Image (cartoon, rainbow, N blue to C red):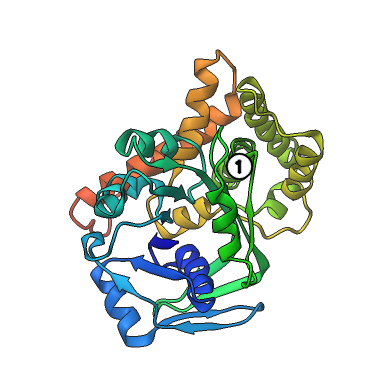
Amino acid sequence: MRLLILGAGGIGGYFGGRLVESGADVTFLVREAKAAQLRRADLIVESPLGDIRTSGVAVTNAAACPPSDVVILTCKAYDLPTALDAIAPAVHPATIIVPLLNGLAHLDVISERFPAAAVWGGLAHLGVTMTSDGVIHHLNSLNTLMFGPRGTVDERAAALAALFASTPVEARASERIEQDLWDKFVFVTALAGMTCLMRASVGTIVAVPGGERLMLQLLAECSSVAEAHGHAPNPEQLERYRDQLTQRRSSSKASMLLDVERGSRTEGEHLLGDMLARAKRLGFEAPLLEIAAAHIRAYEHTREHQASQPTAKEGDHAAVL
């Protein structure tokens, strides 16, 4: 199997690095700055499961490599259109595209762009950060990768899983990937919505009066949307989510909140906006979800407005006291 991985950041670099280490045929499709960084210092992963240092193969144009059997996307949702343009030269009718994005909206976008390709579901559970010089730090032993065709059977799923057999990655070909995607969609949307709305970690939220109740209310709203679509989390899964979202002294924050704290663009529309749109199409009342979505939209509006304005001088900001 020839694999093309779009991106060599935390997720793409970690999973791709593990595959390169095992001898798999992997090419990274990256921007020129990242390609130059890899030429200078290789791909480096520091992990409790074993460090990686490998040169890998990196290209800046997919036309420079042969058509790929599998393309793995590790971009942010808002970068999806440019990502699809980038991979287009490597996609042919037999190509499998595995997007490792949260949410669901991207699947239709990819299928419309590449109707002949097989667009699978995919998701990752991985805790990583990356330093300014490109070193990937794997934070714990969690490194799960799940993928599979949606609504069909494809023997290539087992072949892809087999590529990870000699690595520490817990790779699994799922026969219920649609449900797996919905499960994560529910959890991540509840986590992102509440931690961004409160600008606080899970532990801080549940430590204040009303915090735990509101957290569970948002989880219930998201779960109701999934149930109405025929993908309700099973009771055991839902109970695990409740436990994680109400854990005392938990420092857990959604990556979306980290983006907000950096003043960066978020995937708010792809997660909160999409979940809210699905609720509205069903005629569901989801008041807390609507507030959380409006909060992120206000943040994005402010961010875009500030980016378009000249640098403010001291005293330029009005305040009502």
Residue at 75% x, 41% y is 212
x and y percent of residue 31 in the render?
Answer: 27, 66
Quarter of the picture containing the N terminus is: bottom left
The residue to which callout 1 is attached is 194
Quarter occupied by residue 297: top left
Amino acid tagged 1 = Met
Residue at 47% x, 31% y is 274
215 relative to 164 in the view: left or right: right
Residue at 34% x, 79% y is 38
x and y percent of residue 107 in the render?
Answer: 44, 37
Work out whether 25 lies above or below 319. Answer: below
Residue at 20% x, 50% y is 309
Q: Nearer the viewer, residue 219 or 147?
A: 147
Q: Nearer the viewer, residue 258 or 11?
A: 11
231 relative to 52 in the view: left or right: right
112 relative to 9 in the view: left or right: left
Quarter occupied by residue 239: top right
x and y percent of residue 280 in the render?
Answer: 51, 18
Quarter of the picture containing the C terminus is: top left
Work out whether 312 lies above or below 112. Answer: below
Quarter occupied by residue 194: top right
